[in-house]
Image: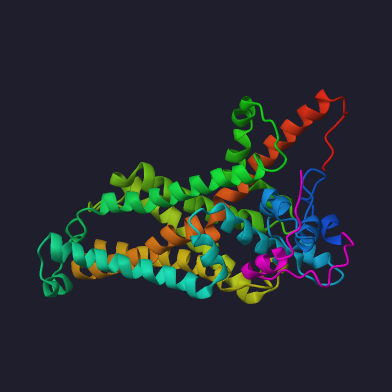
Amino acid sequence: MTNVCDPTLLTEVRKYGSFDVSGCFNCGSCTLGCVLSTDHASFPRRQTRQVLMGLKETVLSGLEPWMCHDCGDCSTVCPRETKPRDGMATLRRYLASHYDWTGITAKINSSKIWYIGSLAFVAALVLFLVVAYHVYVEKMPFSDFASTPMPLEHMFSMMTHFTLVVILLPFFFLLSFAMRMYWFTVNGPERITVAPNLYLTEAKIFLLHLTTHKRMGECSEKSRWPKHLVLAWGVMIKLSLLVFALAWFQTDKLYQISHPQRWIGYLVTAFIIYGAVEILTSRLRKKKEVHKSSDMWDWTFPILLLATAISGIVVHIVRYSGLELATHYAYTVHMMISVPLLVIEMPFGKWTHMIYRPMALYFQSIKEKALQKEWFAEGVPKYVAP
């Protein structure tokens, strides 16, 4: 692999957050202190040096920043307090911005104005679409729209199609970004020859880490894993319902409290609220290394999750109370919060780690197996990290 030194790489990376190299004297304490770092995937010292040396192709082809689970053990043991945990988070934003062919992620991850502006724009667009649908499609005067009690089915007759678009469009972007991630990492400068069957046999790695996040349980802060898993499962169940059971879950029918549609909804909401509140309170207390330093991007995502769950509860209460006008307004507000969360955060924001982390572990497993096969074929006893 040929690397060309890019002297602007450090400046480019720092557009996405904190990346301290001035204090680092390359002692390796951060790597030794990380239980997830291995000979095959060593971090964070190696990535710090790569950025400092301007090895852009190597940085872009690396999967290690995604294999880091943001526990902060590296920052705890750093004798120079350079906060390598923050540097790895910055690198994840940098990498995500390069996987994105639209350029939106780069703007959102490097500019507070772009980030908040994009969320506000989508929220305003949702309000406009709701009003425009009634005024121009259903020929309802705006005064009637603002003051007429309406059931959910009349408020937005095409809500089923709208919801599918809002869910499936971000998945389309994420899938295309994952393909670019593959191109940079597996099919990147190393030019690894991968047997086709490896993509199938190693797919279990992706599913395992997508559903369990088990590597987080290997970090020193053991209690963080089950809390994060509760939130992740709440989000995954809700997304699965919206994709595969939309007509059953999003309906104008009123069910008894014993109906599965209600108690599954209650369980999912409880999971999301618990997880979001736990993250926010930990960031406020700043007792754990993982939450000692937070920026706007770190705060906004859990706040949006919490606001989505709470506004959904309000819609549920007023709807089952028979307050149609209140339901009309509450549901509009709920959509103005939840749609930006899905359309902006999931494909372009902090939520992308939901896909990139398990995908990185999947790609890393493929690379290791393929490289081991190549080295064994050449008579080398085992794979040694380059």
Residue 202 x/y as whole percent? 64, 32
Taken as a whole, is the magenta stretch helix, strand or loop?
Answer: loop
Which quadrant is the C terminus positioned in?
top right
Q: Is residue 259 above or below residue 91?
A: above
Q: Which residues are magenta?
A: 1-28
- The answer to whether residue 42 is left or right of residue 175 is right
Residue toward you, 305 or 253: 305
Residue 325, quarter of the rendered image = bottom left
- The answer to whether residue 126 is left or right of residue 214 is left
Residue 139, quarter of the rendered image = bottom left
Q: Residue at x 44, y 54 (%)?
A: 268
Q: Is residue 311 above or below residue 168?
A: below
Residue toward you, 120 or 325: 120
Residue 100 x/y as whole percent? 53, 54
Residue 381 x/y as whole percent? 88, 28
Which quadrant is the N terminus positioned in?
top right
- Magenta residue check for 25: yes
**Colour scheme of the rendered structure:** rainbow
Q: Residue at x 74, y 36 (%)?
A: 368
